[in-house]
């Protein structure tokens, strides 16, 4: 399965232990991780600026993500009512990359899930789906 993880899931996975890091580990081991370039850039910025991650940790995160399927920014966003333009690019990138689903903790993307061409799941919902299949 092709899985796209949003910035907040990836940042949590690299910065803390818990559900997000478990999700990332399973996706890396059992699925294809799609990483939109917009997410790759944002993960690095958030880890550096908000979490004050050390350069070696930033390098490791970038190396792990860049070694996956990197999805270039598409030409346009989808015609969906998503409040944050950055979130619209994440969803558009996931769709353009052929993702089977997008995993996010972002309320704006989760709210738009009913109108999305691909499933948009919270990390918990994705984890539960994995455990039942």
Image (cartoon, rainbow, N blue to C red):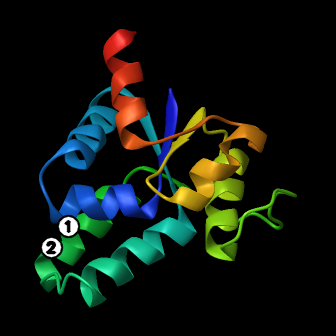
Please state the horizontal and vertical placement of residue 107, each as a whole percent of the image: 53, 58
Whether residue 9 can be seen here: yes
| Spatial CA span between label 2 and label 1 | 5 Å
Question: Which of the numbered marks, if any, corresponds to residue 23?
Answer: none
Residue occupying image coordinates x 25% and y 65%: 61
Residue that sits furthest to the right in the current view: 79
For mark 2, give the secondary structure. helix
**Hey, which quadrant is residue 133 in on the image?**
top left
Look at the picture and state if 37 lies above or below 110: below
Say if mark 2 contacts mark 1, CB within 8 Å.
Answer: yes
Q: Position of residue 99 (x, y in %)?
A: 61, 39
Crowding at mark 2 (Cα within 10 Å: few <14, some 14-19, many 20+)? some
Q: Up-down: is 25 above or below 67? A: above
Which residue does the numbered mark 1 point to in the structure image?
A: 60
Answer above or below: position of 21 versus 63.
Answer: above
Q: Nearer the viewer, residue 16 or 107?
A: 107
Q: Which mark is residue 57?
A: 2
In the picture, residue 67 is in which quadrant? Answer: bottom left
Residue at image point 21% right, 39% down:
22
Closer to us: 80 or 44: 80
**Secondary element at image label 1:** helix
């Amino acid at each position: 399965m092709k899985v796209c993880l949003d910035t907040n899931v990836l940042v949590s996975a690299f910065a803390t232990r818990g559900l997000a890091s478990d999700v990332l580990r399973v996706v890396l081991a059992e699925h294809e991780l799609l990483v939109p370039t917009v997410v790759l850039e944002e993960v690095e910025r958030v880890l550096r600026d908000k979490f004050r991650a050390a350069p070696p940790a930033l390098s490791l995160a970038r190396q792990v993500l860049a070694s996956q399927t990197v999805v270039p920014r598409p030409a346009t966003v989808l015609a969906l009512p998503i409040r944050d333009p950055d979130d619209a690019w994440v969803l558009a990138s996931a769709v353009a990359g052929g993702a089977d689903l997008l995993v996010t903790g972002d309320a704006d993307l989760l709210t738009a899930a009913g109108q999305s061409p691909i499933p948009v799941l919270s990390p918990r919902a994705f984890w539960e789906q994995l455990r039942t299949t």
